[in-house]
Image (cartoon, coloured by chain):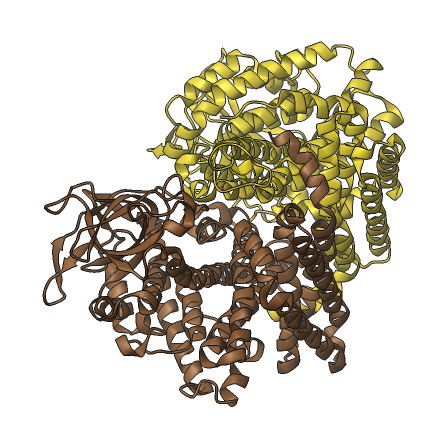
Chain colours: A yellow, B brown
Amino acid sequence: MYRAPVEDISFALNEIAGLRTAIDQGVFPELSADLVDAILAEAGRFAGDEVAPLAKVGDTQGARLDNAEVTTPDGWKDLYARWCEGGWNALSAPQEFGGQGLPQMLGVAALEMWNAGSMAFALGPTLTMGAVDALEKHASHELQQLYLPKLVSGEWMGTMNLTEPQAGSDLAALRARAEPAGDGTYRVFGQKIYITYGEHDFTDNIVHLVLARLPDAPAGTRGISLFLVPKFLPDADGNPGARNDVFCASIEHKLGIHASPTCTMIYGDGKFGDAPGAIGWLIGEENKGLACMFTMMNNARLAVGMQGVAIAEAAWQKAHAYAADRRQGKAPGYTGEGMAPIVLHPDVQRNLLTMKALTAAARAIAYSCAHATDMARAMNGDDARHWQDRANLLTPVAKAFATDIGVDVASIGVQVHGGMGFIEETGAAVLYRDARIAPIYEGTNGIQAIDLVTRKLPLAGGEHVHGFIAELRADAEAVRASNLPAFGRSAEKIAAAIDDLEAATRFMQDGLASGRTQDALAGATPYLRLFALAASAAMLGRGAVASKDADRIALCRFHAENLVGETAALKERVMEGAESLAQAAKALG
Amino acid sequence: MYRAPVEDISFALNEIAGLRTAIDQGVFPELSADLVDAILAEAGRFAGDEVAPLAKVGDTQGARLDNAEVTTPDGWKDLYARWCEGGWNALSAPQEFGGQGLPQMLGVAALEMWNAGSMAFALGPTLTMGAVDALEKHASHELQQLYLPKLVSGEWMGTMNLTEPQAGSDLAALRARAEPAGDGTYRVFGQKIYITYGEHDFTDNIVHLVLARLPDAPAGTRGISLFLVPKFLPDADGNPGARNDVFCASIEHKLGIHASPTCTMIYGDGKFGDAPGAIGWLIGEENKGLACMFTMMNNARLAVGMQGVAIAEAAWQKAHAYAADRRQGKAPGYTGEGMAPIVLHPDVQRNLLTMKALTAAARAIAYSCAHATDMARAMNGDDARHWQDRANLLTPVAKAFATDIGVDVASIGVQVHGGMGFIEETGAAVLYRDARIAPIYEGTNGIQAIDLVTRKLPLAGGEHVHGFIAELRADAEAVRASNLPAFGRSAEKIAAAIDDLEAATRFMQDGLASGRTQDALAGATPYLRLFALAASAAMLGRGAVASKDADRIALCRFHAENLVGETAALKERVMEGAESLAQAAKALG
């Protein structure tokens, strides 16, 4: 059973991402190291003791649809209520609307723990927090007063309605439409698919944020507006009143996250209400809906990255516990009775350490990204811009790398269990199934890589990324200067990876500047992985130097000497792979 | 829907593995190129038209257990009957017992197609063929006459009973026991788990091959004997008679291959028969059961490798078809109406070509392994020994690499489908689920890697592998000497990979010779992957040079320039990774 790795998380926040220094410098006056640890410990307790025990029933029962009503698994509604009572929904929500206003880092850390307890559970509140963000930044005062307190407390939940059958990665193809009703409201019509927690029994009301087109809106992404469409229209007291003309027509039968209802939502077909059309309110300006949605998406991308970290952590813990218990064969040096625990077999150790190192690597990047977001909010002027650039740079890396390794680590976890891993009751397979959605939703990892290369490398005139690389170099140098023999050849390996990153980065920037877009697109995915390996190698070195802890040094070294060497080949793929790709692609038709 | 890639398979057999040359030289007098192609085409038709359409019902219904009887999914019993009627069960079985006696290569090629149609279906007959092998080589004349004709025709099916709860990878821990009954038969007692097709409704009888210990047998693997235990004892006419004291107590709820019943079998608890104990017959000599089982296991390992190739091929076909159909966004150079097919996006092309190249790479190794087995049987003396060494060398590589890439390629296949990939109805997710067992069963891939390093590198005094490497060098040289610009830098990349393989091989051999076993065990898995990448790069080059086909050259180049570069880092992991692994493993407890 999952136990929250509070110490590892605190370490990543404080010693790698920079929270301790920031607290010491007074950047977050409301925080202290003790408060941070207390919150982490309490969140960890809830995740391990309350959320994790309900993961299995969630997977086996799944969400069920009957007559447009979704029933969640046994005990889940109560779990959600206890979770709200604990104030967890409000952790990093604005204080003005009843939230605790804590830095995003703590929200993200808690999110890692909820997701490790049950990804299908944590996903719902993640969407609500996205809705809170969007409303806080873009909604009218009246809408904020009416909806935000309830969304912050968790009394109501929120959803994001983007995708349509013909419009997935390409939102320009959206067809849902909204017509002004003449009274300040709109009537929304259309079909949305893949709507997470689009319908459920957790709350009395559900607040849908829906992208749709106004009449005569420009084609493409510049003609999309954002609307708030509640399931029940609030009455004069703000309580759920008349049913709005929106309902869940079906839920998907999915590979994983079975308890999370993935809904097809139908707006405005006349099933409810006295006139056709779901009543909605405009959020932000007309035709600027995509900008509002991007507010949510950046945070949502990091949140999905946390799912990758969470699944990897849960898989690692489960595999490690199994390997310590399961006995097979003889192991080098084992002198005990009978068969040796398989954790003593070098090949099993290699699997376990790969899981552990990749989890730590993804966590380091993700928390660095969260820290940058918090710093951007806490600072002003150029400092704020610098940190916002940093958050923007790291967001696609955190999302894609963490979710890729989530799949890889869950797969290794199944392998460590041998035949038991393939049996559903063991609980290793469900992580492998759940993990697989994270590289897909909130922008596929291919799209994250393209975002990194085409939108993030140009930040600050192309210089921000080089400032980041210079910081990584300082980490490698600190490892070298520590003169600790336990680091082995870590410093040299980390430095070599950073050289590869710098060369590949210059290649990408030069390519984009000289119009070789196709080459940049072809190499984007290997570039993102190279970026993540080099950055995480330096970050693990930074933490290990700070702590001087033997285990953290050893893990840094294992990562640097066993996993990071791939950067040389990745650099070649980035810089030389496009021609052969284009040549071979001719056969694809 | 899956269409058998008959042309690619024929190409791998003839131009890469060497079948064409062998036929030209008269090694297989019963074969001609036309006959081979005719058999492949007919097997491909059956796999695509008959097997594949029943895969979905197999996954959704699964096998069901009721009162010790297993019911297979709707239509599966009839599919099995048609499959036997077509003579497919007998393809490479001995002619003496009604088989067609064709070389194993054709059996393996057909197996790829059945598995791509439905892995859960193809798995059953694979076990029967293993039983045929074991009985043909080790059973008494009487047992052969009684059982082999029915197993060859498919009228009865066979099973392999090895695993017990405490004895998985380590068969030395087996506890099942057999007592001589005094009449030449034995009474078998014990519990076996993970017995594939241990119970089902396909056939009137099921023939279990069971590992058990005789009274006073030596401890460990030298005290294990092999027994034949039929579900129904044949009567005087050889028809199923009295029920034997063996039954299926439960079936597993698995991640994938739902239609394949994975049974817990109970022997000798008195549920059936007049005296406790399942009646069995000894196969081979007392206490030599493991040697008999290894006869089956070598072939079974290659057969499982074919599952990896098969799943990869099925995933590639499905993803390619989806990418050609699905339209999203703008693609470089696309000038058609509306959104571009996603197959035109470079990042999607990279995913698809990675799938295609890895599938071709695994297929090349697997068919080379099958060819070596056939050559060993067809030749005599030193030639036979040489080819048997080659088969033994390539078997763990074929098993582990093909099943690893089966998982990877199925995962990429889900990714190419975007959100649709996570929906079970699409059919991409089931490949990701089914694929995951193949790296585990028939010896985990970690065990394959250890087998490669500790048992196969020493073959022929350590020289066989260097002969193999010399052949790979000739392939790289042929690519260079072809002077075809379309190969790009393939020759250089392939040669570099072979250099890495040679260095890592010498390191492993030197390490074992000087007692550094722990280092060899620590590096076994990266070594196997390095071996497979270098070998497959050379093999794809061999085929491309032979064909001079633009698409095959382009795929060879994509593989060499984009996927094979990993060998440099793998070599480092093999030669330098053990120390950091051992250091970090201290924290594992």
**Quadrant in the picture for residue B564:** bottom right
Pick the front one: A392 or B389: B389
Q: Is residue B282 left or right of residue A589?
A: left
Pick the front one: B113 or A468: B113
Residue A388 to residue B521: above or below:
above
- Residue at 87% x, 43% y: name it: A462
Q: x and y percent of residue A49 in the render?
A: 49, 18
The quadrant in which the C terminus of chain A is found is: bottom right
Q: x and y percent of residue B328 in the render?
A: 60, 54
Residue B412 makes an appearance in the image: yes
- Residue at 39% x, 28% y: name it: A57
Q: Is residue B154 left or right of residue A559?
A: left
Residue B112 to residue A72: above or below:
below
Residue B139 to residue A120: above or below:
below
Pick the front one: A255 or B557: B557
Residue A547 to residue A429: above or below:
above
